[in-house]
Image: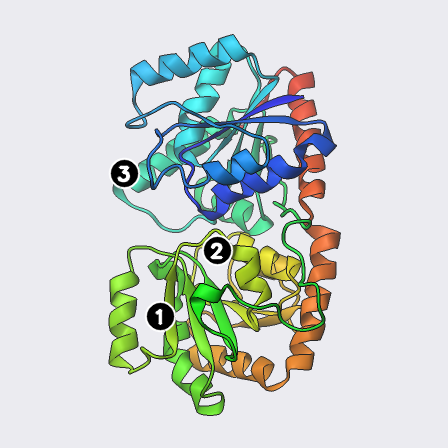
């Protein structure tokens, strides 16, 4: 089955990185995957390309400048008519808005995936989301990666109306041959350039944006240091909040114990060398890939109980769930796991088993194959109740 995956851009974001993981296991599900980025190649918008190439996928670029880019929309239609994939799978709003209509004009079934939980929007952002949803709902399948995501969209856009037949939930997965525990019983060494040997390390792997709640992890850090003065908080990622977070770290006199590591491509090594992973989001989380990756690497997690996070983290078994925005609760959870490394080890082992049972990318690929086959068999037809 030949599947063209269309994404907005090849950033190192959660949704985009999942495509590279799917590429590594797709052949086992009888899926021949190709990838098209709507945006052109640039240092920021093509960071995922090396990971795709490692999986044997050479992406193509359409160089779209905006959603209503008519010449490039026509080029996309022509591309689909020429390459004739069996099905088109669009991820994220711009990709769905452009690729699903283009696929229809080319006579090819299409599906779309939303990777976020709805949150209140206004202006153009609200209009973009509504348009993408209306278009996706008229595709062969509108995929949400958690029940929390589907429910949030139904509450906002289908109040008093039935959920369309095209809407379905398919959990993402990760490549558990790539995200694995370390070879020995203890922690693996962290990458040498981080210079953290001998320190307990708590890692936050997330975009430095307001909804990730990283400010609350920083607020929690003095209480952690009071009990574990050698501990280090490692922030892996970049984003619009970085300067504000740096200022907060300086204000709290935490410069020596909070490390801004920027974007990195050696995430398995970082996770395997971390005592635990923290995701302190306050809203907007759907099915965070980093929590699956931490579980795959056999590491315990502390995370806010928002969105679809509880689908991944079994509270008290594979990690600890805390109230969003509760710095004291975050500190207490981190401290309890640093106090009892054996408990953290047991949680990490349980997390690995949970990922194998529920979030193996091979399961994801198989579930997608089922959705794709149904779309192909019905020639992409779908009935939408209004």
- For this view, does 368 lie left or right of residue 81? right
| Residue 189 image-quadrant placement | bottom right
> Image quadrant for the N terminus?
top right
- For this view, does 210 lie left or right of residue 294? left
Q: 360 and 120: which one is in front?
A: 360
Disc 1, SS: helix
Report how far apart the C-alphas of labels 3 and 2 lie in the structure.
21 Å
Q: Residue 139 at what x, y percent from top left?
A: 53, 24
Give the labeled residue for mark 3: 124
Q: 111 and 343: which one is in front?
A: 343
Number of callouts = 3
Q: 10 and 332: which one is in front?
A: 10
User: Residue drawn 69% across and 49% down?
Assistant: 177
Q: Which is closer to the viewer, label 3 or label 2? A: 2
- For this view, does 243 lie left or right of residue 119? left
**In the rendered structure, which disc, 3 or 1, sits on the residue that comes first in sequence?**
3
Report how far apart the C-alphas of labels 1 and 2 lie in the structure.
16 Å
| Residue 325 image-quadrant placement | bottom left
| Residue 206 image-quadrant placement | bottom left
> Of all residues shown, which one is farthest toward the front?
192
**Res. 215 mark:** 1
Count neighbours of disc 2 (C-alpha within 10 A) and say few if under 14, some if 14 to 19, many if 20 or more.
many
> Of all residues shown, which one is farthest toward the bottom?
226
**Res. 285 mark:** 2
Q: Residue 102 at what x, y percent from top left?
A: 44, 17
Colour setup of the view: rainbow
**In the rendered structure, which disc, 3 or 2, sits on the residue that comes first in sequence?**
3
User: Residue drawn 69% across and 80% down?
Assistant: 342
Mark 1 and mark 2 in contact? Answer it, CB < 8 Å.
Answer: no
């Amino acid at each position: 089955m030949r599947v063209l995956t269309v994404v907005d851009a090849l950033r190192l974001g959660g949704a985009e990185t999942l495509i590279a993981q799917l590429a590594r296991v797709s052949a086992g599900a009888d899926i021949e995957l190709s990838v098209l980025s709507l945006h052109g190649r640039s240092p920021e918008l093509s960071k995922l390309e090396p990971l795709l190439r490692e999986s044997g996928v050479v992406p193509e670029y359409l160089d779209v400048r905006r959603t209503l880019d008519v010449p490039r929309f026509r080029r996309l239609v022509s591309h689909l008519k020429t390459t004739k994939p069996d099905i088109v799978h669009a991820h994220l709003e711009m990709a769905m808005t452009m690729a699903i209509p283009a696929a229809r004009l080319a006579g090819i079934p299409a599906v779309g995936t939303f990777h976020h939980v709805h949150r209140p929007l206004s202006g153009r952002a609200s209009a973009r989301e509504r348009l993408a949803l209306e278009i996706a709902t008229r595709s062969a399948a509108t995929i949400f990666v958690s029940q929390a995501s589907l429910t949030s969209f139904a509450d906002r856009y289908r109040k008093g109306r039935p959920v369309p037949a095209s809407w379905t939930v398919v959990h993402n997965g990760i490549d558990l041959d790539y995200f694995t525990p370390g070879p020995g019983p203890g922690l693996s060494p962290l990458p040498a350039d981080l210079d953290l040997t001998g320190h307990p390390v708590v890692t936050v792997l997330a975009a430095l944006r307001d909804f990730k709640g990283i400010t609350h992890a920083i607020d929690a850090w003095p209480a952690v240091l009071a009990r574990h003065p050698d501990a280090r908080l490692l922030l892996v990622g970049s984003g619009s909040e970085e300067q504000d977070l740096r200022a907060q770290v300086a204000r709290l006199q935490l410069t020596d114990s909070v490390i801004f590591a920027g974007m990195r491509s050696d995430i398995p090594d970082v996770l395997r060398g971390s005592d635990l992973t923290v995701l302190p989001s306050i809203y907007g989380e759907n099915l965070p890939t980093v929590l699956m990756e931490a579980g795959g690497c056999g590491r315990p997690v502390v995370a806010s109980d928002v969105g679809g996070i509880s689908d991944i983290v079994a509270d008290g078994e594979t990690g600890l769930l805390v109230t969003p925005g509760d710095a004291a609760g975050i500190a207490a959870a981190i401290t309890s796991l640093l106090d009892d490394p054996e408990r953290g080890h047991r949680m990490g082992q349980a997390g690995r088993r949970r990922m194998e049972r529920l979030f193996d990318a091979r399961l994801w690929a198989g579930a997608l194959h089922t959705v794709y086959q149904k779309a192909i068999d019905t020639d992409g037809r779908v009935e939408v109740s209004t």
